[in-house]
Image (tube, rainbow, N blue to C red):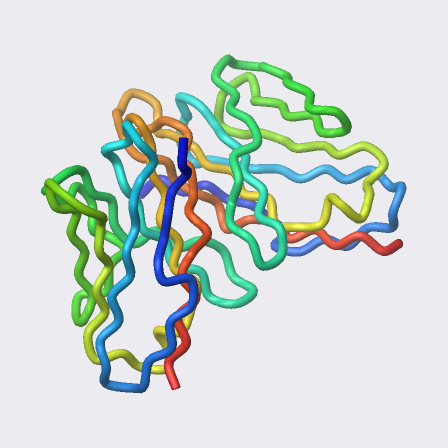
Amino acid sequence: NAGVMQNPRHLVRRRGQEARLRCSPMKGHSHVYWYRQLPEEGLKFMVYLQKENIIDESGMPKERFSAEFPKEGPSILRIQQVVRGDSAAYFCASSRTVADTQYFGPGTRLTVL
Amino acid sequence: GQQVMQIPQYQHVQEGEDFTTYCNSSTTLSNIQWYKQRPGGHPVFLIQLVKSGEVKKQKRLTFQFGEAKKNSSLHITATQTTDVGTYFCAGELAGANSKLTFGKGITLSVRP
């Protein structure tokens, strides 16, 4: 049973470009969460999605960031017009039910030049 | 909103010493979970506590859920260099079918 998969593992973008981060949850998991982790800092919740629905996006910046979890395919975290401050590790986690154990993917390390 | 707090953010111990860290919530929790993130890695689930006063052990790690279900502790006996990493607690608000709220974590370093 494959775990949570994220790709790419490393992503380099220049300022102003777009970054697309993908997350495939564990089989049987319909709840997906995105977190951002800055160097030497803790996990910061960004958004919680179920299939085709955004449940809680209280941690998402109001501009440039969006997330989706379509009926088919992986969840996507999209960052438009990236800036240097967006450089961070972005982790996706999935769970079977809303408060169940969360299983984390290996993360995408985004570097903005 | 609900907060799950872990203080301090960093702790340094000598190998062989015991280590205890705490997690505190402003509200009652249905359950609390602990995760560990090794340097350069991703958070990995360690354990879940559900009952008031519950104590669970994993080798040298002892986890406890407070009687009021508002706090939890993690105790490591005789730390080893393999214990280095960041330990996060995460709680679910009681009475609400809500997502977990993570604390900021405590980063443990162990001097050999």
Residue at 77% x, 40% y is B19
Q: List x then y, in percent, for residue B33.
A: 50, 30
Q: Give the tally of numbered discs.
A: 0
The N terminus of chain A lies in quadrant: top left
Is residue A87 depicted above or below B18 in this figure?
Answer: below
Rendering coords of residue B28 (x, y %): 41, 25
* Quarter holding residue A85: bottom left
* Residue drawn where x is 54% and y is 43% of the image: B88
Vertical relation: A47 (above or below) A13: above
Q: For residue B40, what is the image quadrant?
A: bottom right
Residue shown at the point (23%, 69%) measured from the top left: A79
Q: Is A47 placed left or right of B20 in the picture?
A: left
In the orientation shown, which residue stands out farthest toward the front? Answer: A1
Q: Position of residue A57 (x, y in %)?
A: 20, 51
Name the foreground residue: A74 vs B112: A74
| Quadrant of the frame with the C terminus of chain A | bottom left
Percent x, y of residue B100: 37, 36
Q: Left or right: where does residue B104 sit relative to residue B85? A: left
